[in-house]
Image: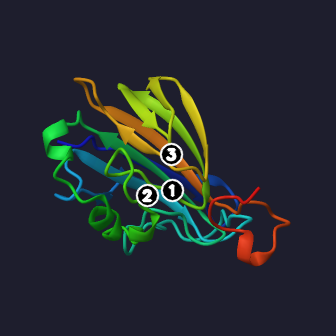
């Protein structure tokens, strides 16, 4: 069973006094049979930069997508249960990511069925457990308290341990280089 997260959202009353506008269990979750053992919980989405902090209290309604909105961000936790290699060998990563609007983000023929990349800068904090971050050739064992800055690279997450792993993510829409020609601002950088 997936962990439930209490989400507290602050704001201001009509007199400009700081208040708690919402205090409840986060309900924007994604679980699916095409990616067993993984639960995504969204807490907040922004649709512009700079982000508006005096707007709507609920920003996560609608379809659950992998990547952040254009010029925006997403704050979420992903819980990874231990993987079963036999089950993993039967899964279709492209179909699973398509359910999140990201079928084109999967890396075909990669060493893990969920190897993918997004045009974003992702800040990750390993909250509990441990997990392998797989890259094209490298892999790194990450443990609770470790942090990652994922910069638009191919990657997959593989929990080879015996305990669940929870990772907090902030994904920010990104480009390869801000001064690149528009046709070269997304995708893998050309050097």
Residue 169, label in figure: 3
- Which x, y percent locates residue 161? 27, 24
Q: Position of residue 15 (x, y in %)?
A: 69, 63
Which is more N-terminal, label 3 or label 2?
2
> x and y percent of residue 150 in the render?
59, 44
Quadrant of residue 3 in the image? top left
Q: Are marks 1 and 2 in contact (CB under 8 Å)?
A: yes
Q: Nearer the viewer, mark 2 or mark 3?
A: 2
Query: Along the polypeptide, which appears first: circle 1 or circle 2?
Result: 2
Q: CA distance from mark 1 to mark 3?
A: 14 Å
The residue at 37%/55% (across/down) is: 109
112 to 21, vertically: above or below = above
Q: Nearer the viewer, mark 1 or mark 3?
A: 1
Report if the CB atoms under discs 2 and 3 are less than 8 Å apart. no
Residue at screen point 72% across, 60% down: 190
Measured Cα–Cα span from mark 1 to mark 2: 7 Å
Nearest the viewer among 151 and 1 is 151
- Say which residue appears at 35% left-offset and 52% top-offset: 114
| Residue indicated by mark 1 | 117
Q: Residue at x 30, y 39 (%)?
A: 80
Other residues around mark 3 within 10 Å, as few (<14) / some (14–19) / many (≥20)? many
Q: In the image, residue 47 lies at what x, y percent?
A: 60, 71
- Residue closer to the observer: 138 or 38: 138
The numbered mark at residue 107 is 2
Which disc, if any, is residue 49?
A: none
């Amino acid at each position: 069973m997936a962990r439930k997260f209490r989400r507290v959202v602050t704001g201001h009353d009509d007199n400009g006094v700081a208040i708690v506008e919402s205090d409840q269990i986060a309900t924007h979750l994604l679980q699916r049979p095409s990616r067993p053992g993984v639960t995504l919980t969204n807490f907040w989405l922004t649709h512009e930069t700079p982000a508006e902090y005096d707007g709507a209290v609920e920003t996560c309604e609608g379809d659950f997508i992998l990547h952040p909105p254009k010029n925006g961000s997403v704050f979420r936790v992903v819980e990874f249960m231990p993987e079963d290699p036999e089950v993993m060998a039967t899964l279709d990563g492209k179909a699973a990511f398509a359910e999140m609007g990201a079928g084109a983000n999967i890396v075909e023929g990669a060493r893990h069925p969920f190897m993918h990349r997004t045009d974003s800068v992702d800040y990750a904090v390993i909250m509990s457990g441990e997990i392998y971050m797989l890259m094209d050739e490298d892999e790194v064992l990450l443990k609770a308290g470790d942090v990652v800055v994922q910069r638009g690279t191919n990657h997959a997450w593989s929990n080879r341990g015996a305990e669940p792993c929870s990772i907090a993510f902030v994904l920010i829409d990104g480009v390869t280089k801000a001064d690149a020609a528009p046709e070269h601002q997304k995708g893998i950088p050309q050097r």
